[in-house]
Amino acid sequence: MSLTDTAIIGAGPYGFSLSAHLRAASVPHQILGQPMDAWINYMPPGMLLRSEAFASNLHAPQRGFTLEDYYREKGMRYQPMGMELPLETFVDYALWFQSKLVGDIQAVDVAKVRYIGGHFQLALSDGRSLNARKVVIALGLKDFAQTPAVLQGLPERYASHSALYGDLAWARGKDIVIVGGGQSALGLAALLHEQGSSVHLIMREADVIWHPRPQTSRGILSRLARPDAGLGRGWRSVLLSDYPQLFHMLDHRRRKQIMEKSFGASGAWWLRDRVVGKVKISFETEVCSAAVENDRVVLRVIREGRESSVAADHVIAATGFTTDIRQHKFLSKEILDTISADGGLPELTSNFETKVRGLYVIGPASAHSFGPVMRFVYGARHAAPCVARHIAGSLQAGATADAWSSAEGRILERTSDSSIL
């Protein structure tokens, strides 16, 4: 059995950012997971990031590792706003960040996490096990995909969720129905249409909310009236983007209200010309049933009180995500029973710690405690330094790695910076 101080579950933007801060604080740790797995394997090639470039930085404890720094090193033209940011470029940037500040990663999945005797035991997918004083869950949204009940009984051949893509070549030349009206639905519709699929978008909304193209040069009065922030324009966006601790101070009812009314279904400015007039859209339409008939999926839909049918080769549910920590099957029942509240939402302290001491949650699953900024890469600038300070502080307070020396096994050198151990 191997030992470490802190295990980070998740090798994406939040995991990388936290690892960089722990490394700077000389905290021995392991980062577990396939590097940028969801971004590489579950997002379609050619996708553009919704966030503006200035809001797409991983967070480092020192200067020189922003997206702009990466562009400069590669000799590419950078623009903080109004620049299209391809998925592939962002992944390359994140892996560059990893190579500079994180180092090697344990490219394994975590099969089980148990809390025993004041520390955590992790069973890994390669058969090894790991003991850790602290564990940080730094995963994305994939486990929280929400598929409407009406589509859940369909075989995978005929129905899937937008969280599962991935290369879209399988859909070339096919009839595809997309259910949903947000960024994911609109982005998939554009990519599928451009590769030769016949796309029909079905949405409950009366229209698509399109974000305007950013104004890269504004006067000082305009910027004072509606400043730019990580999540958009305006003072409300500034508060939600840059002051997650204020959000954390609100009562549960108010937090839930803000989450439900913030950043709903909408489309980025660079998608409008790729969708409008090119993709068939049915507005104010509800799917009431679905079945497979003659090797096609047939949806019964209702619009303006009238029922009709829509047939396709495949239907994609681009219907968003619902945070439910219970979907992380690797957590033991005892841990889940302790940290789950209000339908699976983890209640977190101001340091992102759960009710199980030493277990932290950062990234999208922390959004109901710290606001919608945690659903975006921009939130790493708040979570990573906060959690790193708390872990480093507890280590200095007496829970040192020496306490592990009598335990079974050996200290596993941190692959991200073994020289500091």
Image: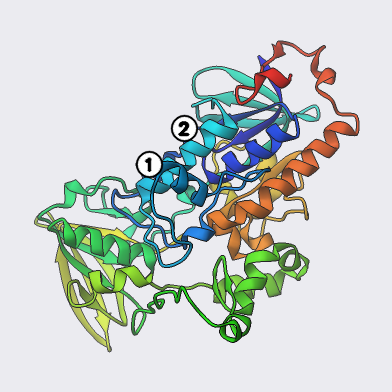
Quick check: can you spot residue 246? Answer: yes
Do the residues under discs 1 and 2 have CB atoms within 8 angstroms? Answer: yes
Quick check: can you spot residue 344? Answer: no
The residue labelled by disc 2 is: 34
The residue positioned 22% from the left and 64% from the top of the image is: 177
> Residue 37 at what x, y percent from top left?
43, 38
The residue positioned 54% from the left and 29% from the top of the image is: 111
Observer-nearest residue: 340 or 369? 369
The amino acid type, in three-letter code, at marker 1 is Ile
> Residue 287 at what x, y percent from top left?
29, 72
What numbered label is drawn on residue 258? none
Looking at the image, residue 199 sits to the left or right of residue 162; the answer is left
Q: Secondary structure at mark 2?
A: loop
Q: Up-down: is 144 above or below 52?
A: above
The residue positioned 16% from the left and 55% from the top of the image is: 195
- From mark 1 to mark 2, how far is it between C-alphas? 10 Å
What numbered label is drawn on residue 40? 1
> Image quadrant for the N terminus?
top right
Q: Secondary structure at mark 1?
A: helix
Observer-nearest residue: 234 or 201? 234
Q: Up-down: is 151 above or below 35?
A: below
* Residue 302 picture quarter: bottom left
Q: Up-down: is 267 above or below 151?
A: below
> Image quadrant for the C terminus?
top right
Instruction: Tell me if mark 1 has few (under 14), some (14-19) or many (20+) residues whose alpha carbon lies within 10 angstroms of its own.
Output: some
The amino acid type, in three-letter code, at marker 2 is Gln
Looking at the image, residue 380 sits to the left or right of residue 70; the answer is right
What is the basis of the colouring in this image?
rainbow
